[in-house]
Amino acid sequence: MTFMPTPVPMPLRIGKYRITGLIGEGSMGVVYRAQDPDIQRNVAIKTIRAPLRDSTGDGPTALRQFRVEAQAAGRLNHPNIVAIYESGEYGENGEELFIAMECIDGPSLAMLAKQGERLALPDVMASMLQLLEALQCAHAQRVW
């Protein structure tokens, strides 16, 4: 059975961050564009979907995975890996989880592929090299 995410209304705030738009949605969560009010920078805010926060089914596993992801990504410092600024809880009872991270502007590879764009071989090679360097950094920190 495939999990079909149900649309959720876009929040106005997550923690201290003012939500300014939607970046993307997946089966596990939603990523929003937001503004950090303290230093006036754009950030990406990743949240976990409500059904995965529940204590039934995969809830505890998904919550644990989300927290481990925040901790693991926060240990990484590399130009090809987005920086993690903060992780935390929000909502009336702190039942919502988020990760605030560096927001990178530009089209995703998926978007380019959907538009029929094909990268030239030197661009593919440069992208793969950057990806492999990021993986090497992650593996050196025991992030698999």
Image: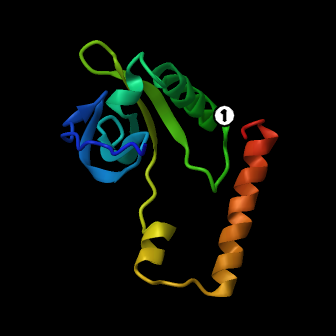
Q: Which residue appears at 67% of the width and 49% of the height?
A: 78
Quickly name the residue at label 1: 75
Residue drawn at the location 58% of the way across and 33% of the way down:
69
Count residues near mark 1 (Cα–Cα under 10 Å), then give few for <14, some for 14-19, many for 20+. some
In the foreground, 36 or 76: 76
Q: What element carries label 1?
A: helix
Is residue 129 positioned above or below 18 on the image? below
In this picture the colour scheme is: rainbow
Q: In this view, does 119 lie to the left or right of 41?
A: right
Residue drawn at 23 percent across, 33 percent down: 13
Instruction: Please identify the quadrant where the C terminus is shown.
Output: top right
The residue positioned 68% from the left and 61% from the top of the image is 131
Left-right relation of 23 to 65: left
Is 14 situated above or below 90?
below
| Dot 1 amino acid type | Arg
Q: Which residue lies furthest to the bottom in this view?
A: 120
Q: In this view, does 117 lie above or below 33?
A: below
Q: Is residue 106 left or right of residue 35?
A: right
Q: Which quarter of the picture shows residue 75?
A: top right
- Location of residue 12 in the rendering, given as x and y in whole percent from the top left corner: 19, 37
The front one of 70 and 57 is: 57
Q: Quadrant of the N terminus?
A: top left
x and y, in percent, of residue 63 in the image: 49, 24
Q: Residue 28 location, x and y as percent?
A: 43, 39
Label count reads 1
Q: For residue 141, which quarter of the picture?
A: top right
